[in-house]
Amino acid sequence: MKDQSDMTTLYLAQSGQKFLIQKVKIKGDLKRRLLDLGFVPGSVVEVLKASPLGDPVSYRVAGTVIALRKEESQLLFGEVIQR
Amino acid sequence: MDQQQRLDALAAVTPAEELDHIRESIVSNLFQKSRELCSKSVVIQDKNQLYKSEKLDRIFTSKVWGFPIMLGLLGVVFYLTIAGANVPSSMLANFFGWVEGYITLAFTAMNAPEWLHGLLVLGLYRGTSWVVSVMLPPMAIFFPVFALLENYGYLPRVAFNLDRLFKKSGAHGKQSLTMAMGFGCNAAAIMSTRIIESPRERMLAILTNNFVPCNGRWPTLILLASLFMAVGFTGGMHTLVTAFVVMGMVLFGVIITLLVSWMLSKTALKGTPSHYTLELPPYRKPKMLNTILRASLDKTIYVLRRAVKVAAPAGVLTWVLANIYIGDTSILLHFVQFLDPFGQLLGMDGFILMAFIIGMPANEIVLPILLMGYLSTGALTEVEDMAALKQIFLDNGWTWLTALNMMLFSLLHFPCGTTLVNIFKETKSWKWTFVAFAIPTVIAIGVTFAVAQVIRGFGWV
Amino acid sequence: MKEYTIALAGNPNTGKSTLFNALTGLKQHTGNWAGKTVTLASGYYRYKNIPLKIVDLPGTYSLFSNSEDEEVARDYIVFEKPDVTLLVLDATSLERSLNLALQVLEMTDQVLICLNLMDEAKKKGLKINAKQLSKNLGVPVIPISARNREGLDVLSDTLLKMCSGTIKTKPYKMKYREEIEAKIIKLEKELSEILGPDYPARWLAIRFLDGDSKLIAALKNKLASNGEGGGVHGSTTALGRSGGGHSC
Ligand SMILES: Nc1nc2c(ncn2[C@@H]2O[C@H](COP(=O)(O)OP(=O)(O)OP(=O)(O)O)[C@@H](O)[C@H]2O)c(=O)[nH]1
Ligand SMILES: [Mg+2]
């Protein structure tokens, strides 16, 4: 696994890109919820589409589509996997 | 207890700073295993089909089309409801009027005392039949259409589109889902706020849910809009204008919801939005006929049951109040006269306020009580169609301002009794239940007062 | 005749209420969004003249509750000890559904899995091998389409067999990373000493390990009220028989 400084956040990933989650830098209840939804280290998330007003953004994760606000996606670290 | 103490000791087994890490590894392991199981037993044959929903989302949640489609759908639902409900409503009113004639004949034939006829026919029968004829047709059309949208999967997209606005007001994006439930029934919507994890944002959703008109209120909105707001238009145009007015009301309710949420977030319910996750399930084509039949049957039974349970007793009560005299004025009129100055200040009258107060247990009886109040004062008109209804209002000095303010008051006023009970059950707090009553009441009074002053000030009525 | 209780559990929006309606003939509201059902509902279903009590639960993403509706579901599955927990999985998003399934299998042996929305899965070009899945998970897996009433007979047959004990399951038990396993085993031993055999010690050990304070509070509550009411009832059911190495 990479050093944290090389990682970017899910928020910065572009629509259509796939993103490998490596670190979930959140505490407490929200962390639990995100984990349960499949935002776990080792998961690949695909960025789908922003809402009409720009935020939230929808992601495909664990075979489902989940929308996150930028406050959340900024705390999910990892790397964009090129394809 | 010894057992409990030993459990407490174990509960602290993981040091707090390690908890997140342990959770993460447990859930990661679970998902690893899930993926492994999936790869063993699931074969994807066609990626294109798999991602069909996303293509639709590109339209339904698009920057350009997202909002117009939302408003358009809302408008279409209202248009269909209004266009479809008009004729059956008149037919039902006619039918009940026709039956009433025979019942009255029977009472006369049996030499029944006048008060009995009054109580049973003018009170109970009329109260019930008005609720049925005014409420049933729009409900039996609106809810099937709504159920189609709901089962198709459109509601989460609305929440997705609107989230930014709710975030700005310090509220949770899922509040729009609970508001959508409010269209059906605010009392049920209060329960549905359970889906909002954070207590602060859940409270916002509870306190503002009332600004969504429920099924007991918006037949009133439709009726008044169609009688007073769309005058001068005929046919399809009339329906369209009515639909626009009703839609305007709903949007105004949404704006008030956002404003109140925003103000509460800055004051009594201070805080920043907590975490937010929203699932967007794939669109699923509903079973058309099945969904439509079930939803309209459901609503029909619901309306009929409410008519018997609430409207009948309210009809009797109103008749009794209108026919017991203190001095030469009935109790009902005493009450009305007491309220009248205040009602006039708000651009309405004492009868309307009386109806809202007696109608507290359930919103669908407000209009029937109002009519009964008006009728108790003068000639006993039989209400055979919607034009006759309008005449009753006009005879009592209504203008379009009266109608507008009654619509606004209906949209904004205190929650019904059942809703308040549920708010208490869910919050377990008298204080918050009172706040849930007070906020809408104050806003309803403030808004109608302001509107009345402005419109009269400009001499528009 | 004994009345059997069956709880419908699963992720939100997997068709639990639709299945409930199909079985009981009642009219729970359904909708294509997560969180439609927020309270318990129960109804009766007679199959081959045997009455089954079916309980529709709110959907839940995991046994770790976040919101109040999920808590309702969690408490029922964990503490009410239904004769069978009928897990309704979404065939079109198995990966996430299985996350919950694995957790439930940790807790009780009396689990029956149905893969709902098979019609949607087919439309989407997904081919799912239910036999394989059943072999891997150690419990019956039955493909159905609740809305089209497909597969309900097989489902009901299997349900009855599970209730009457004709089918014995051997649920897959999750194994975690070594260091975590070690901690789990230690905790599990202590917990089974404290609680006796009526509670799923291994599953509880994992909850204690990840500090699920709401669950621990609910457990203590339950124990306190049992103390007053005199003993744990219904111990023949699910919770008692699960768990790993211990037996007493
Ligand atoms: N195509 C198809 N749709 C289904 C099937 N079963 C359920 N649905 C639809 O899936 C949606 C969700 O169904 P519900 O029964 O409300 O789901 P639930 O699991 O009770 O959801 P929550 O109460 O939110 O947890 C509804 O729109 C149903 O019409 C099925 O077998 N096939
Ligand atoms: Mg449900």
Image: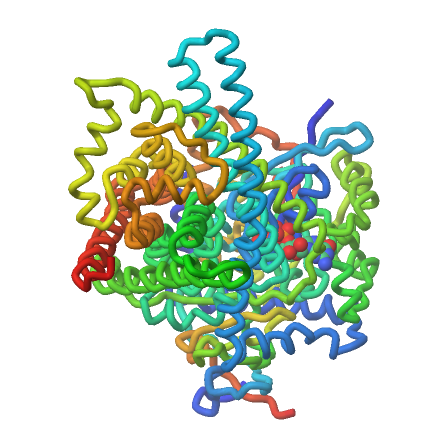
- Residue C146 spot, x, y in % from top left: 73, 50
* Nearer to me, C186 or B383: B383
**Which quadrant of the rendered structure holds the C terminus of chain B?**
bottom left
Q: Is B186 above or below relative to A78?
A: above
Task: Say which residue appears at 77% left-offset and 59% top-offset.
Answer: C118
A34 on left or right of B261: right
Q: Kindly tell me whether residue B207 is visible in this rendering.
A: no
Please tell me whether residue B168 is drawn above or below residue C164 in the rendered image: below
- Looking at the image, which residue is at 66% across and 61% down? C98
Q: Nearer the viewer, residue B199 or B256?
A: B256
Colour scheme of the picture: rainbow
Q: Position of residue B350 (x, y in %)?
A: 23, 38
Residue B14 spot, x, y in % from top left: 42, 59
Tag count: 0
Residue sitting at the far top: B111
Q: List x then y, in percent, for residue C217.
A: 41, 45
What quarter of the picture does the N terminus of chain B occupy? top left
Q: Nearer the viewer, residue C9 or B438?
A: B438
Which of B62/B402 is in front? B402
Q: Is residue C181 visible?
A: yes
Q: Residue at x 44, y 48 (%)?
A: B223
Q: Is residue B38 above or below residue B90?
A: below
